[in-house]
Amino acid sequence: MTTRSLRAITEAPNPTRQLVSIIVVTYNSEDEIRDCLQSIIRAKAETDWELIVVDNASRDRSVAIVRDEFPQAKLISNTANVGFAAANNQALPYLQGDLVLLVNPDSRLCEGAIDAAVTHMKKYPECGILGGLLLDEEGGVHPSARRFPNALRKILMLSGLREHWKSKKWFRDSEFGWSDFQRPLNVDWVPGAFTMLRRSLIRELGFFDERFYLYYEETDLCLRAKRHGWEIHFIPDSRVVHEGGASSRKHDTEDFDRAGSQVMRFRVLAECLYHRKNHGWLALWSNIGVEWAWHRMRAWVSALPGRRSEGKRRYSETIVRQLESALRETKFGTFCPPRPW
């Protein structure tokens, strides 16, 4: 009997009301957390849910807002920022639901988002992790489903070919850019802004790998799930308005990737750890090497007479320094630097 058949038997749709454990991790989120939690309440879910908020040593009023305005939430208040992965793991002892929903504080759930996810998980027991449709304030679609990263996909992104050939499926495959996102998809991984997981998957595989202080923790978890026979699904019926990078931008002393939503140093450290852990030294060298070579060349070209672009040169030189530093700090992907990075 296949793994899928076994799960279909052991996790058959439950006719009774399901309990979903919702985890929200905050970090200096006073501008977003009220709207986020109110959207969960207003989602009018027929599904029963419990709410757990883990605060990562916010210096603003995040804790006070949750404590004073949302008494239904179980609040875990850290004295240090332990990172996204470890903070979610802290909620494990308090989970009561068979399904676990991760929601970022800069996400706002649209009506029906929770129920649509629960319905899909009941219908497809082979689905271990599910993501929804991420939208911006104007209703535009954010990247909501991804392929696992590799050197070729990075080349297509760095070179601009991915954006130039938007109509070509092969060039846009890394984030399913060829899809209209109007139907469910079987994908590699989904962003953590709105992610539903089975509790049974967590019991089987463990939760997030705490070596990832920030970034790549959800990619790593989805890869582990797929290697153990689970499927990762995207569904359009769980709609979520997502600002993106709100907590990351609170690290105001750090350099950011061009999109402004990821702390560059944290991203390259996590990338080194991810590739070496999951694919070995060759994957590490190819993925980091491609980016290093691209920005080394770009910095040189930007400094040529007639091609001078100080902004591009400085940006590329910063990335080169961060990549070289990340390789040293992680001992070429074999060592996790002390947290926080």
Image: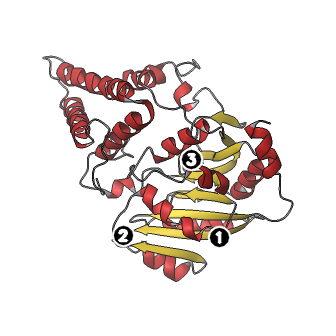
Instruction: Looking at the image, tell me whether mark 1 or mark 2 is earlier in sequence order.
Output: 1
Q: Secondary structure at mark 1?
A: strand
Cα separation, mark 1 vs mark 2, equals: 22 Å
* Residue 50 numbered tag: 1
Q: Amino acid at mark 3?
A: Glu
Q: Nearer the viewer, mark 1 or mark 3?
A: 1
- Residue that carries the numbered disc 3 in the rendered image: 138
Residue that sits furthest to the left in the current view? 305
- Residue that carries the numbered disc 2 in the rendered image: 57
337 shown above or below 304 = below
Residue 151, quarter of picture: top left
Residue 26, quarter of picture: bottom left
Q: Nearer the viewer, mark 2 or mark 3?
A: 2
Residue occupying image coordinates x 49% and y 61%: 89
Q: Is residue 315 left or right of residue 44?
A: left
Place of residue 7 in the rendered image (x, y in percent of width and height, measured from the top left): 76, 46
